[in-house]
Amino acid sequence: MDTQILEDIGLTGAEIKVYLALLKLGPSNAGPVLDRARLHNSVVHNALNRLIEKGLVSYTKQGKMHIYQASNPKHLFEYLDEKKERLERILPELLAREESSKGKPEVTVYRGVRGMREILHELLDAGGNWHYTIGSPIESTMMGDAFWIDYHKKRHNKGIRAKIIFNESLREWTEKITAGGHYPAAEIRFLKEGFEPLTETIVRNDKVGILVWTEKPAGILLHNKELAESYDKYFQYMWGIAGKEKERGDKAPHLHLHRKKVQESLLRGRYMIGKHGYIKAIKRAE
């Protein structure tokens, strides 16, 4: 059983072992839980107390003995709702602090699949009415069909139209997804077959995201109006090329060389951004 999701919602490894042990055992004192979870006595009792506080375990007393019982797993949704409500209460203060902060980085680095989710949602919330994608490769499907379907549903709900240039390797996948109407308000074109960089560029309002779809993906988010305007023009140039075989054959290598430099810089951990779009200031978000 994959228990990663339980860690993601805030349970510790010990809490997960104890909770799963109680689900299997049913009402039980601490002894069988110790044996099944294979944890020290103090660790099990601490985990039980935390699970009781979270509403995921209850207990009754039989004489001097505590009998513990795991709550219905459906109560995990109530646990999540409670955390969401608490977050919503402090969110205005968090946003106010962000707005008042000085020296926001022009460049933020993200790593791993979680990092890719974060950078994509940062781009989704960047404002503006258009979403431009250049050169998404087949490797981007590592995020899963459900993620991309939900992402573009949210984009559409925000009133954002999309123009997307995919690599040829995504044509079959795209036909399958769009057949279900899952990329609303989007126009899609393809780059020449055989031209398959592992980078994807997304332009959104005053932000640009460069995503590197390697086995361990990474990306950089550039927050610069002048740079975004430059990439906007670059996208319009590539949009006119995509789908035109004669023109693409001559023009595409320029895009490949540009992306190769960005990818090499990202993987080396060296960055510079000047007025023409080179990376200069770094803060990492991992």
Image (cartoon, grey):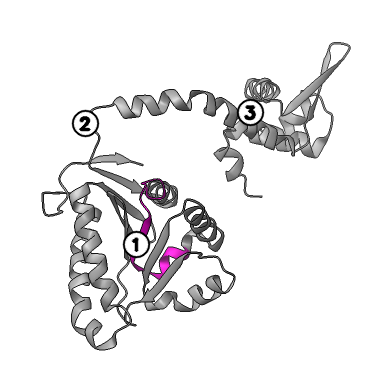
Which numbered tag is attached to residue 82? Answer: 3
Label located before the other in sequence (3 or 1): 3
Is residue 249 shown to the viewer in this render? yes
User: Within 10 angstroms of label 1, few (less than 14), some, or many (20 or more) residues?
Assistant: many
User: Within 10 angstroms of label 2, few (less than 14), some, or many (20 or more) residues?
Assistant: few
Magenta residues (range)? 123-141
The single residue placed furthest to the left in the displayed view is 275
Location of the C terminus by quadrant is top left
**Residue located beneath label 1 in the image:** 132
**Residue in the foreground of this view, choosing between 140 and 226:** 226
> What's under tag 1, amino acid-wise?
Tyr
Q: Position of residue 168 (x, y in %)?
A: 38, 78
Q: Residue at x 25, y 60 (%)?
A: 232
Q: Residue at x 45, y 26 (%)?
A: 92
Cα separation between marks 2 and 1: 27 Å
User: Within 10 angstroms of label 3, few (less than 14), some, or many (20 or more) residues?
Assistant: few
- Which label lies toward us, 3 or 1? 1
**Residue located beneath label 2 in the image:** 103
> What's under tag 3, amino acid-wise?
Glu
Horizontal arrangement in the rendering, residue 34 relative to residue 245 (left or right): right
Label located before the other in sequence (2 or 1): 2
Q: Secondary structure at mark 3?
A: helix
**Residue in the foreground of this view, choosing between 255 and 34:** 255
Q: Position of residue 35 (x, y in %)?
A: 73, 32
Cα separation between marks 2 and 3: 34 Å
> What's under tag 2, amino acid-wise?
Gly
Cα separation between marks 3 and 1: 37 Å
Is residue 270 shown to the viewer in this render? no
